[in-house]
Amino acid sequence: MTIVGNFIGGKTSLSASSETIPVYDPATGKVIRELTQSTSDEVAHAIEVAHNAFDSWSRTSPLRRARILFNFKTLMEQHRDELAELIVSEHGKVWSDALGELTRGLEVVEFACGIPHLIKGENSADVGTGVDSYSLMQPLGVVAGITPFNFPAMVPLWMFPIALACGNTFVLKPPALDPSASVRMAELLTEAGLPDGVFNVIHSSNENAEQLYKDPRVQAVSFVGSSGVAEHIYTTASAHGKRVQAFGAAKNHAIVMPDADLDATVNAIMGGAFGSAGERCMALPVVVAVGDDTADKLIAALTPLVKALRVGPGIHKGKDENEMGPVVSAAHQKKVLGYIDKGEAEGAKLVVDGRGIQVEGNPEGYYVGGTLFDNVTTDMVIWREEIFGPVLSIVRAPDYKTALDLVNSHEFGNGSAIFTSNGHTGRDFVREVQAGMVGVNVPVPVPMAFHSFGGWKRSVFGALNVHGPDGVRFYTRMKTATVRWPSGQKTVSEFSMPTLG
């Protein structure tokens, strides 16, 4: 059986420990690969290799760095189907969703190819007699990324293209559940001309991976995952003097106003709630309906669609493609089913029950059917906690103000949306909602690569968001030089505050 190895110093390698863990196909529940597990010393070695590569890479022309990334983009497009197959086989999402993930990731590569323009700094001539001042945006050094299972290609692509374009070297720890896409991208980077050691992939236990945010040679760390782990990494890495962007849980809400276009809204909610089996940090698991009439109409329209969802393996393509694949693991399947149990026990009305779904030919797959709750209230676990599965909750509110207050009362503030035909209401929502990413008649308001992605409240730890302008700021540090040219020098010593003439 194939063993997925590390990628360090431009080549793949297995851990000397010989320890491996299984990688499953969620559609079948069968082991399809093994994953090497690195020792603490091997994690340190990956950091050392990246550290040694930094000086040369940081001195490489930004244009040359950009050309390598452009080559990488071309190779990614040529190998798109291969990468999509790896994603589908290890994560379980449907084929079109895997292709969409790669497209959104490649948009960040395209943005990174234009970074020379964004790191050119600023210049002020003649700030004093014979004195010029200018700023430089310089790379940090070794930076690390720890990425989640739900987007095994896209989330790493949020990070490393910008980091590399800015002149940093990178150590990536991908998710153990679906690691292969990251290793394949590392191979394509080398084929694109990236020098050995600039980008490295290491697989290890969480305990051994702590070096990525404690080692003094690592200057910054990016993380996407649960809020508990995000907070731990943020506090620990910050205490070790590192720059941190750590993205945590989400519980995204949509308000549906009585004047919303019902058909368009229902279609948007279906995609937002059940795309990728709900395993998205920008999924739409909660809808707050304004008025009982609005809620009743939504339930009536959503119920047959949720019941009719085509659930099965993600590898089918074209017109016969399933709409929803399995969740990523047996443990996660159990967790999601447990939330459905809790919602029912706490008194929510279970309109469509996704428990017990059977997918022909795949009895051991990790499937959860589309699930719809009505009359969910704020004291319920399914309101408070991120489920990360195909479970949609309808909450009822008497008016817009109450609905907005409900959304803003939640501890997470990643994304939020409103469906309305009233421009005043939409504009007010954008201003007043306490979330980092906002949609108006858009269910999943993920920013484009040239904007920055990030939430509010306990959905994020750190001051800078990922990709876009914030991504460039995160992976660079400013240096300002003030220069008096020889012809402007004075011949006597100065002991007072310099005023530069």
Image (cartoon, rainbow, N blue to C red):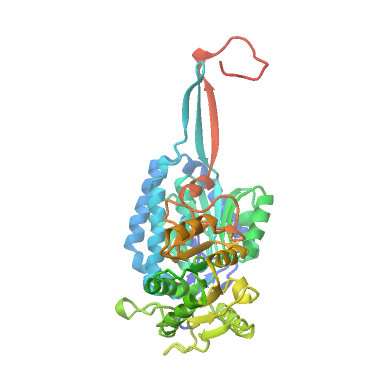
Q: Quadrant of residue 449?
A: bottom left
Residue 11 can be seen in this image: no
Question: From the viewer's perspective, is residue 69 above or below residue 429?
Answer: above
The residue at 36%/68% (across/down) is 82
Q: Position of residue 447 (x, y in %)?
A: 44, 57
Q: Position of residue 418 (x, y in %)?
A: 47, 64
Count the marks: how many?
A: 0
Q: Quadrant of residue 433?
A: bottom right
The residue at 60%/19% (across/down) is 499
Q: Position of residue 275 (x, y in %)?
A: 44, 73
| Closer to us: 456 or 184 | 456
Q: Quadrant of the C terminus?
A: top right
Q: Residue furthest top?
A: 491
Q: Position of 64 compared to 48: left or right?
A: left
Q: Position of residue 492 (x, y in %)?
A: 62, 10
Q: Position of 440 compared to 318: left or right?
A: right
| Closer to us: 125 or 188 | 125
| Closer to us: 306 or 167 | 306
| Closer to us: 7 or 417 | 417
The residue at 50%/35% (across/down) is 136
Residue 114 can be seen in this image: yes
